[in-house]
Image (cartoon, grey):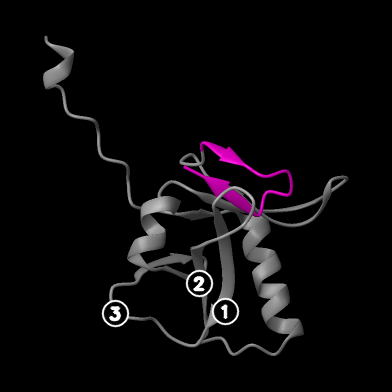
């Protein structure tokens, strides 16, 4: 078969959250009295040393076009533009020797900065 006629397989438009990250999200929500109806927003914005920066914040509600994911009672939302860059990404939490914080394991990132807060495609 001619390789030039083959279509590239579609990347699933999904994000994933590990149990460790979910535990930390619940802890942050509890310690900061964030209401249960607030959702966790994952996103990207221009900037950072590699071109794009990750965004992680609680949001009161969904916006039109947001994709909603549910993980053990925690709703995670991603806007369509960010989902383009975050498809297949797993949000994890690390409490190791290299520091404490959320970690984005993004298969779309061609390069990332040393701190892991920004990436390029």
Whether residue 15 sits left or right of residue 113 in the image: it is left
In the figure, 74 relative to 97: above or below?
Answer: below
* x 52%, y 45%: residue: 120
Q: CA distance from mark 3 to mark 2?
A: 13 Å
Q: Position of residue 18 (x, y in %)?
A: 59, 53
Of 23 and 115, which appears nearest the observer? 115
* x 43%, y 86%: residue: 61
Which is nearer the N-term, disc 2 or disc 1? 2
Q: Position of residue 89 (x, y in %)?
A: 49, 48
Farthest residue to the right: give it: 97
What secondary structure is found at the residue carrying circle 1? strand
Residue 95 in view here: yes
The reply to whether discs 2 and 1 touch (Cβ–Cβ < 8 Å) is: yes
Residue 117 image-quadrant placement: bottom right
Marker disc for residue 83: none
Bin the neighbour count of mark 3 within 10 Å (Cα to Cα): few under 14, some 14-19, many 20 and up. Answer: few
Q: Which residue is mark 1?
A: 58
Is residue 115 covered in magenta?
yes
Farthest residue to the top: give it: 1
Whether residue 82 sits left or right of residue 10 in the image: it is right
Which is nearer the N-term, disc 3 or disc 1? 1
Of 33 and 55, which appears nearest the observer? 55
Bin the neighbour count of mark 2 within 10 Å (Cα to Cα): few under 14, some 14-19, many 20 and up. Answer: many
Q: Which residue is mark 2?
A: 41
Is residue 86 covered in magenta?
no
What secondary structure is found at the residue carrying circle 3? loop
Q: Which residues are magenta?
A: 110-121
Marker disc for residue 64: 3
Q: Position of residue 95 (x, y in %)?
A: 81, 53
In the figure, 78 relative to 12: above or below?
Answer: below
């Amino acid at each position: 078969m001619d390789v030039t006629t083959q279509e590239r397989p579609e990347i699933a438009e999904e994000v994933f959250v590990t149990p460790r990250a979910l535990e930390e999200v619940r802890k942050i929500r509890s310690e900061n009295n964030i209401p249960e109806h607030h959702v966790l927003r994952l996103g990207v914005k221009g900037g950072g040393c590699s071109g794009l920066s990750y965004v992680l914040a609680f949001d009161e509600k969904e916006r039109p076009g947001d994709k909603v994911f549910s993980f053990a009672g925690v709703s995670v939302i991603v806007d369509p533009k960010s989902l383009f860059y975050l498809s297949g990404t797993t949000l994890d939490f690390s409490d190791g020797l290299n520091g404490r914080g959320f970690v984005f394991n993004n298969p779309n990132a061609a390069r990332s900065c040393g701190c892991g807060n920004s990436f390029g495609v």
